[in-house]
Image (cartoon, rainbow, N blue to C red):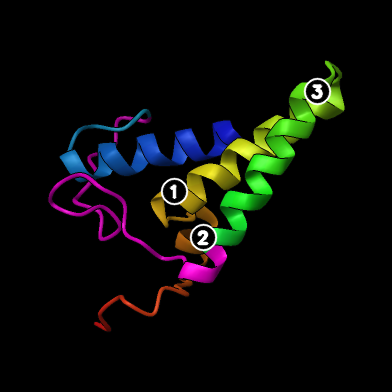
Amino acid sequence: MASVHSETVGSAQTAHSGQTGAHGQQHEKSDHVSQGGSLEKNVGQAERMASLVGGALLALVGVSRMSLTNVILVGVGASLLFRGSTGHCSLYQQLGMNTNQEHDSH
């Protein structure tokens, strides 16, 4: 799961910079990346806190013992920590969702 976010973040940054993507297509500026290069906050405050707490717990449980299941738990935990710390959810972005009440309506 963590790799899904990093790939999405990488493609969003590529789209923002106007560089050519992996398939040779020219990307235009993304609406999901601000001028400063930070991701749009599309997750509400309560969800962010829940993601931080849940992500930390999953990551801690995951590193307790090495197994495939625990490696997956660490990945999911890291993904939730990313979501909670940045306020950005790539899945919400793809679905056009935004639970952040601070965002401006377009």
Q: Earlier in the sequence, mark 3 or mark 2?
A: 2
Q: Is residue 59 visible?
A: yes
Pointer 2 and pointer 1: residues touching (CB < 8 Å)?
yes
- The span from disc 3 to disc 2 (Cα, nearest Å) is 24 Å
Pointer 3 and pointer 2: residues touching (CB < 8 Å)?
no
The quarter of the picture where the C terminus appears is: bottom left
- The span from disc 2 to disc 1 (Cα, nearest Å) is 7 Å
Residue 70 image point, x, y percent: 81, 27
Question: Viewer-proximal residue, 56 or 94?
Answer: 56
Q: Residue at x 27, y 84 (%)?
A: 105
Amino acid of disc 3: Ser
Amino acid of disc 2: Arg
Q: Residues within 10 Å of mark 1 (few under 14, many from 20)?
A: few
Residue 11 image point, x, y percent: 36, 38
Question: Viewer-proximal residue, 86 or 17?
Answer: 86
Mark 3 highlights which residue?
Answer: 64
- The span from disc 1 to disc 3 (Cα, nearest Å) is 23 Å
Query: Which dot marks residue 85?
Result: 1
Give the structural element (helix, strand or loop) at label 2.
helix
Q: Residue at x 61, y 60 (%)?
A: 50
Q: Residue at x 13, y 51 (%)?
A: 35
The stretch of residues the image draws in magenta is 23-47
Q: Quadrant of residue 57?
A: top right
Q: Residues within 10 Å of mark 2 (few under 14, many from 20)?
A: many
Residue 29 image point, x, y percent: 19, 51
Give the structural element (helix, strand or loop) at label 3.
helix
Amino acid of disc 1: Ser
Mark 2 highlights which residue?
Answer: 48
Determine whether, in the image, residue 62 is placed left or right of residue 8: right
Determine whether, in the image, residue 68 is placed left or right of residue 73: right
Give the structural element (helix, strand or loop) at label 1.
helix
